[in-house]
């Protein structure tokens, strides 16, 4: 997908975590060591999914990269720049769509580019382009409350894309959608990723979704409630061609392998 006004748009970026750790609260009594010793290298344009049992630190990792939480140990860089807070180079999509209900679809999408003070012609072109990319051109003047959950999530993705992010950070974005809409959204996100080449880090509870989408699946284990800080158990490459057949033996073998790692992680920490 061609970028518009792209002299200011960042290119897809690497993400690098080195010995990353997070403690919530003060050391000692009452403190929670949520995550420790996380080393992760995501290549520019790579699609990486993160799975693991509840509480193993998936959202914590994503929030640190987003700049919403400071790490308490180690380093985290995006495009070799140390993260010190949120920034427009990183677009974040959550399960709840986070749209402004009082703005129309196109106004929601135009919000970011307007904040960046792009000329209005550029804002208009960007809005048109991303609306097309997510198939919502006909709904430009609708309000979020008039749309289905899947459509609202597409608006949320379009809003992030309109900022030409170098990295997209997605935390269980399709978790609230029904199964059919969810698989349609997965196909759409794969297509958008192919077209934009943006780096994506995507947290999910669904192992199938993780394998459908990813170049590599990060399996996390542990978690504060298990008495072991959350950590990376294994990083599993997905060497399957795109347009993946979730019923193929190779797909199922990968799913089985990842499920076993997730469950071992829970048992080992128990
Ligand atoms: N703001 C916070 N203050 C204190 N502890 C927190 C905070 N946020 C997360 N935690 C704890 O840190 C650990 C990791 O939480 P996190 O939300 O990152 O896990 P997760 O793998 O994303 O879980 P889930 O799959 O349930 O969303 C958990 O034990 C959680 O209770």
Image: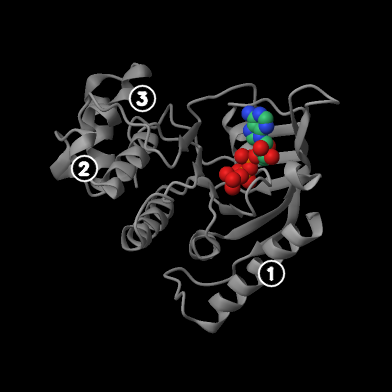
Q: Which of 176/136 is in front? A: 176
Identify the residue shown where x is 66% and y is 45%. Answer: 55
Identify the residue shown where x is 21% and y is 42%. Answer: 147
Ligand 1: image quarter: top right
Q: Secondary structure at mark 1?
A: helix
The disc, 3 or 1, on the residue closer to the chain's N-terminal end is 3
User: Looking at the picture, how far across and down is residue 135, in whole percent?
Assistant: 23, 49
Q: Secondary structure at mark 3?
A: helix
**Residue under pointer 3:** 112
Tell me the quarter of the image containing the C terminus: bottom right
The disc, 1 or 2, on the residue closer to the chain's N-terminal end is 2
Toward the right, the furthest residue is 28
Q: Residues within 10 Å of mark 1 (few under 14, many from 20)?
A: few
**Residue under pointer 1:** 260
The disc, 2 or 3, on the residue closer to the chain's N-terminal end is 3
Q: Which mark's residue is nearer the viewer, 3 or 1?
A: 1
Judged left or right of residue 72, residue 6 is left
- Do callouts 1 and 2 mark residues in contact (Cβ within 8 Å)? no
> Which quadrant of the structure image shows residue 32?
top right
């Amino acid at each position: 997908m061609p970028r518009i006004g792209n002299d200011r748009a960042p290119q897809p970026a690497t993400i690098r975590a080195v010995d990353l750790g997070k403690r919530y609260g003060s050391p000692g009594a009452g403190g929670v060591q949520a995550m420790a010793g996380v080393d992760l290298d995501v290549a520019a344009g790579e699609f990486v999914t993160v799975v693991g049992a509840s509480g193993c630190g998936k959202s914590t990792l994503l929030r640190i990269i987003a700049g919403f939480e400071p790490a308490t140990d180690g380093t985290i860089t995006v495009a070799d720049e140390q993260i010190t807070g949120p920034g427009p180079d990183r677009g974040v999509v959550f399960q709840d769509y986070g749209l402004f209900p009082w703005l129309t679809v196109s106004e929601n999408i135009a919000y970011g580019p307007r904040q960046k003070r792009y000329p209005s012609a550029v804002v208009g072109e960007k809005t048109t382009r991303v609306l097309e990319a997510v198939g919502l051109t006909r709904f430009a003047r609708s309000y979020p409350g008039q749309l289905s959950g899947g459509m609202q999530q597409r608006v949320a993705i379009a809003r992030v894309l309109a900022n030409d992010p170098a990295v997209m950070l997605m935390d269980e974005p399709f978790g609230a959608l029904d199964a059919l809409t969810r698989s349609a959204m997965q196909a759409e996100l794969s297509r958008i990723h192919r077209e934009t080449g943006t780096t994506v880090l995507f947290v999910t509870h669904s192992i199938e979704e993780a394998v459908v989408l990813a170049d590599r699946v990060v399996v996390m284990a542990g978690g504060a409630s298990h008495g072991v800080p959350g950590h990376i158990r294994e990083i599993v490459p997905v060497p399957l061609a795109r347009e993946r057949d979730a019923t193929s033996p190779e797909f199922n073998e990968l799913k089985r392998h990842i499920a076993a790692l997730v469950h071992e992680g829970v048992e080992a920490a128990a």
